[in-house]
Image (cartoon, rainbow, N blue to C red):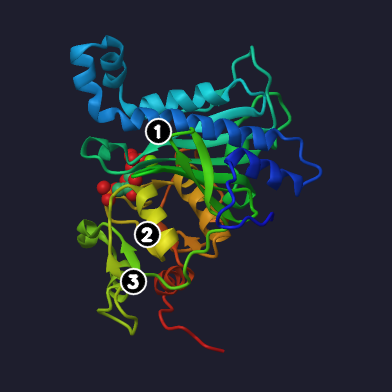
Amino acid sequence: MVKHTATSVVTIDRFIIEEERNHPEATGELSGVLYDLALAAKMIANKVRSAGLADILGATENENVQGEVQQKLDIMANEIIVKAMDHGGRLCAMASEEEPGIIQIPEAFKCGKYCLLFDPLDGSSNIDVNVPVGTIFSVVRKITRGRHGELEDMLQPGRRQVAAGYVIYGSSTMMVYTTGQGAHGFTLDPSIGEFLLSHPNIRIPENGRYLSVNDSYEQLWDDKVRSVMRRYKGLEGDRSPLSRRYVGSLVADFHRNLLGGGIFAYPANRKTPKGKLRLLYEANPLAFIVEQAGGMACDGAQRVLDVQPTELHQRTPLYIGSKTDVELAQRVLSGQPELVVA
Ligand code: AHM
Ligand code: MG
């Protein structure tokens, strides 16, 4: 990795090029995908920022703004990504949490060798109350032979991702991504419209500070999940309690814990026996990031990145964050709560 000092000004474009130079065989196509995603992120950030003004602007002077914003922001974010990505010649297909099937590249455009999977605006039910939302993305290499991407290309285990990341639209807009050479964060400087390297080589603390889980489902959890949570709270076992933080917006909860340490959990429960979050659009990309930062992600039975997907919109339980905290969940859920020291 190229070394940058705390005061170097490095744009995301320059950083992507420098990473590409570490791979002499690279054709530049993956870099192109990342540039286009950064552009889409800026366009979505712009819409998210003006969401609260929609009615005011629409009612007074600008019919378009009102018309546009009546459309749900998550659908709009979906369209922005599709339109920013479909003509670059680097993708052979896309899949989105917002669309039932594969999104094909129009015949007029060239097809490339990558597939993009994304959740355009995760946590969008929080928009009305001004809580951070995010975009999550995953890139895999095409494995089938035809011109267009197929379901088989999309259903690859997460360990085959070649890039993944998220954008958080919060008090500032940040993009965090990995291509397997560490996880790096960039903050959007709105005055110049550029993402600047602000968090090179992120490392998640080994032990957590925070526990992020929706406790309202406690009655629906099985005994093992309850035991995991009691241990995080210091009510069982010998660990000191974690601080509770739950935004209810995955990207915001994940981002805080990535920087501060901790665990985000969305366990299976009696009503949602496969969990709520989506393996391909949410769990896999964040699992790739967290592992690159020295953390861990499991579904309660195995490493998230080793799960073989069978459906595009497959759901998964998720335990993700600091290594020792995720290991604890894995041990308790597999019936071996005590740490065996060799
Ligand atoms: P969405 O993809 O429909 O936005 O749902 C995903 C969101 C996550 O951002 C968040 O972690 C989770 O749903 C919260 O669910 P709950 O309200 O059940 O705690
Ligand atoms: Mg989502």
Q: Estimate how packed mark 2 is, as few (under 14), some (14 to 19) or many (20 or more) residues with alpha carbons within 10 Å.
A: many
Q: Is the C-beta of the residue carrying label 2 under 8 Å from the nearest atom of ligand 1?
A: yes
Q: 66 left or right of 47?
A: left
CA–CA distance in space, label 1 to label 2: 25 Å
Whether residue 216 is visible here, answered yes or no, is yes
- Comparing 33 with 323, the one in front is 33
Callout 3 amino acid: Val
Give the labeled residue for mark 1. 45
Considering only order in the chain, which callout, 3 or 1, is on the residue closer to the N terminus?
A: 1
Q: Amino acid at mark 2?
A: Phe
Q: Quadrant of the C terminus?
A: bottom right
Q: Quadrant of the N terminus?
A: bottom right
Q: Whereabouts is ligand 1, in terms of quadrant? A: top left
Q: Is residue 101 left or right of residue 145?
A: left
Q: Which residue is mark 2?
A: 264
Residue at the disc numbered 3: 228
Q: Please provide percent x and percent y for residue 79.
A: 44, 23
Q: Position of residue 326 (x, y in %)?
A: 44, 68
